[in-house]
Image: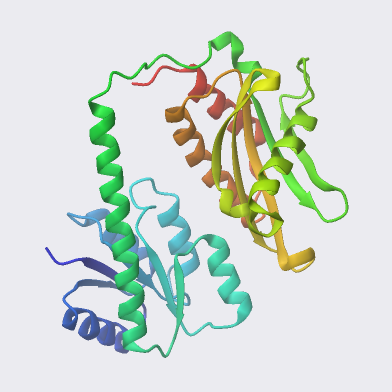
Amino acid sequence: MKPLILCVDDNEDILLNLILTLEFNDYEVITGKHGKEGLTILSELGRLPDLIISDIMMPEMNGYDFFKTVSENAKWNRIPFLFLTARSSPTDVRFGKMLGVDDYLTKPFKKEDLIAIIAGKLTRRRRTIEVSEKVEEVLSSLKIDEKPSISIEQKYLVNLILVFWDDKSGPTVLNCYPQDIKLPFSVDRISVQLYNSIVSIYGQGKVAEAQGILLNIKNIDRDGYIYFDSYPDNTVRGGEQQYMLGVIAPKINYFESLKISEYFKNISSHIKLKEDWDFKRHWEQISNILSTPSL
């Protein structure tokens, strides 16, 4: 079966060029003229596309909103996404990458560049699918303990934290929940120690590469799951604001950390876009993951 590529652009000449180029290189192509039509196509397709190529400036729904909607859908958010657009200013490129778009190719484009990028993305996608299938195969043969890591009564021992890097004072705890529960350790102090520990391993400039890490914090008899990310910000040193989301709990198993990771990715998208998000509501969702048996 040929790889399927969804192309979304309001310019019919560009769409025709994409169809001819991609079909010549043995890809199957389906097209839409704006983001809303792209969403309709995704909803109605019998199989998911292997890649999405989208313009940015389009009527009805622009490329940014189209990508944001795709990335928030659990069924679609693992499809590689490529912006193909005439908007080539550094600000536009940074914004697209800040959103999490896989790549950004400007018009007019060289056909060989487009094909090379597509081939690379589809190869990585195939490897990811193969690894996921292998993991599922291995896990399905195991007897996994589906009991939750903590009891309902222990929910308030779960701490959700947000730490930003400050050029003057270093890692700074911006928020933590709950704040009125007495614990035998300082959540702020542990949060800063976790941040500094990862910086010592990856280096300050590459801390965002750490992504998600599951830890056993022996000195306080807790587990922690921490997730690093960043977004462009010219007001800070290095032009990048780095931050860490974290959960500290009596116990976190690997399977729960995978679910927490998805919540953190969603929260991170709000942080990057500087959107409001409900800290307590996300704490409730994450603490429920840790105290609710798997189905």
Q: Quadrant of the C terminus?
A: top left
Instruction: Please tell me which residue is depicted at 19% across the width and 55% down the height of the picture.
Output: 47
Q: Please state if 124 lies on the left or on the right of 281 as rendered.
A: left
Q: In this orientation, which residue lies closer to the viewer: 160 or 70?
A: 160
Residue 83's quadrant in the figure? bottom left
Residue at 58 percent across and 31 percent down: it is 215
Residue occupying the far front of the picture = 201
**Residue 75 vertical placement versus 83 (above, below):** above
Q: Left or right: where does residue 285 sit relative to residue 131?
A: right
Tell me if I can see residue 11 in this picture.
no
Quadrant, the N terminus? bottom left
Left or right of 118: which side holds 250? Answer: right
Tell me which residue sits at (74%, 66%) in the image: 238
**Closer to us: 22 or 149:** 149
Name the side, left or right, on which 92 lies relative to 34: right
Q: Is residue 54 visible?
A: yes
- Residue 193 appears at what percent x and percent y? 75, 36
55 is higher (above) or lower (below) than 245: below
Give residue 181's position: percent from left, percent from top. 75, 16
Above or below — where is 128 with respect to 13? Answer: above
For this orientation, the residue located farthest to the left is: 1
